[in-house]
Image (cartoon, helix red, strand yellow):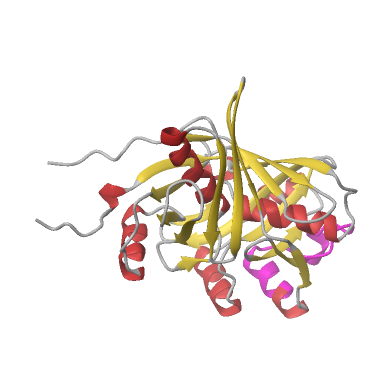
Amino acid sequence: MDSSPSASHVQRWAAFSSDPAGGNPAGVVLDADGMTDDEMLRVAADVGYSETAFVTRGDRSDASLRYFSPRAEVPFCGHATVATAAALAETNGGGDYAFATPVGRIDIRVDDTAAGRVISFTSVDPFVEELSEDALRRILEVLHLASADLAAAHAPALAFAGNRHPLLVLRSRTVFDRMIFDPAAARELMDAEAWAATIIVAWPETETEWHVRNVFPVGEISEDPATGAGAAALGGYLRETRAVTPPRRIRISQGSHVGRPSRLTVDIPAAGGIVVSGSAVRLPDPAVGG
């Protein structure tokens, strides 16, 4: 019998929703000790979600956590982190968890409240870099947008909270909703620029209510329905550009354009990592065909 790791070893969770029809699905392998990089990549490709997380060395603290898309390893993934914490809490209960990730230590808090289980992670320290004019031009081409579609108050940038995300803020809900893109052209651009994660496109309904779309062509996926790392990057961007005065909480709606509505809460402290919170729900294992 073949005892090598397979997709059947994977738990499936949707992060940033309490409804299995919403949120961002992630695979979770809690017993990845001894798996090679190739095996992890193969399992992630078999699962087919935007990311699958792999836990090694421990089950509560001092554990290591790695993330693989169906194409490659990803430095950090927020929704798969939330999914992993949910999987661990199902057995071990709420409390504090910590993971060593490729970008550094990530601390997590699992709280059981009257409204349900809430999972929060604190990102590594965020920063913002300039987005070159050429990169911006190419992003606008891929997304079929024009410079006039950008919000004057929010300059395009590269925002980091574990991954570098190109980040654009649009001027209106109409422009935000009508944005379309060619996944193949987006992937070509992202690979050329070595952007391992998503392109963030945001629109502020109010100062504290944001709508976000995350371009992420990988496998059968073109747009991510909930992006914890992107939410942390947006929070860091708003703090670093002084668009908000911390401490400040914002809420993000995401995923409606791909039929998986999601809600993320982002707490922006005066310094340090950005805290991203949400719920998670376990998804059924896939049916085994005969």
Looking at the rendered structure, the number of numbered marks drawn on it comes to: 0
> In the depicted view, which residue is nearer to us: 107 or 251?
107
Q: What is the x, y in percent for residue 100?
A: 53, 60
In the figure, residue 120 lies in which quadrant?
top right
Q: Is residue 5 above or below residue 156?
A: above
User: In the visual, does 14 lie left or right of 202?
Assistant: left
Left or right: where 22 falls relative to 177: left
Q: Residue at x 45, y 41 (%)?
A: 88
Tell me the magenta residue range: 136-157
Residue 152 is at least partly visible in this image: yes
Q: Does the rendering let one see residue 179? A: no
Is residue 139 found inside the magenta-colored segment of the image?
yes
**Quick one: 132 or 124, which is closer to the camera?**
124
The C terminus lies in quadrant: top left
Where residue 14 sits in the image (x, y, percent)? 48, 40
Quadrant placement of the N terminus? bottom left
At x 61% / y 50%, what residue is drawn?
107
